Image: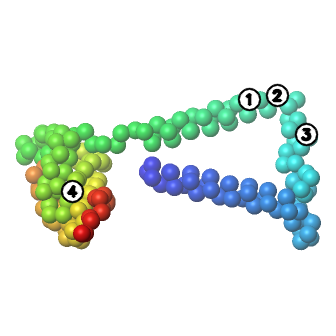
Amino acid sequence: MLRVTNRILLALTGTGLLLAGLAVLAAAADLPDRWGITLPSGYTWRGPDSVLLGSDGRTRWHGTGWWWPLVLGLLGLLVLLALWWLLAQLRRRRLAEILVDSGDGVGALLRGHAMEEVVAAEAESLPGVDRAGVTLTGRRTEPEARVGLVLLPQAEPAEVVRRLEAESLRHAHRSAGLESLPAEVRLRASKHPPERIS
């Protein structure tokens, strides 16, 4: 959900900035007059010498009683939305525990950090893997894994991912009694100094 919200906000902000930039360029280059485009009657920015918000537009609503409550309310709402978005970015999405079916109808809780360490250790033992990091997300009955692997130069990425799925992740979801453990795997190459041939 947060990823979709971020993309929508980014698209809306980018579209707004693009339209504002095009309006500035059109007014600064006096394109409406050159191309014979008639602008709406309320549009005040008509040429290079005009301003976006004239004195009439700035002072039109000052005398009304609803103006300042509306402005303050909208600004307060924008601040609250910005704070919500910031807190959502900073919130920990790591899964603290996993519910394991123990067969007695009650279940047992497995620490998410313990499972992350086990999967990471098993992934690091695979040939071609230098380092591994695992983060569990989702719900405690349906966890998902985010796996980051740093590969050695001689590693074959397709083989590493195949063995990760067939060994490390399969062992993890079977040992926890889960039906599946969906995973997102990110691969990076390890940085190593250049080899000198003499």
Residue hosting label 4: 130
Mark 3 vs mark 1, CA separation in Å: 21 Å
Tell me: 198 left or right of 107: right
Q: Can you identify the residue that label 1 sits on?
A: 69
The quadrant holding residue 12 is bottom right
Amino acid beneath label 1? Pro
Counting residues from the start of the chain, the first of labels 4 and 1 encountered is 1
In the rendered image, is residue 42 in sight?
no
How much space separates mark 4 and mark 1, taking CA atoms? Answer: 59 Å
Dot 4: what SS?
strand
Q: Could you tell me if residue 50 is visible in this image?
A: yes
Which residue corresponds to mark 2?
65
Q: Compare marks 3 and 1 and give the one earlier in the sequence.
A: 3
- Residue bearing mark 3: 55
Disc 2 secondary structure class = loop
The image's mark for residue 8 is none
Q: Position of residue 33 (x, y in %)?
A: 92, 66
Instruction: Give the crowd class for mark 3: few <14, some 14-19, many >=20 residues within 10 Å.
Output: few
Q: Earlier in the sequence, mark 2 or mark 4?
A: 2
Q: Amino acid at mark 2?
A: Gly
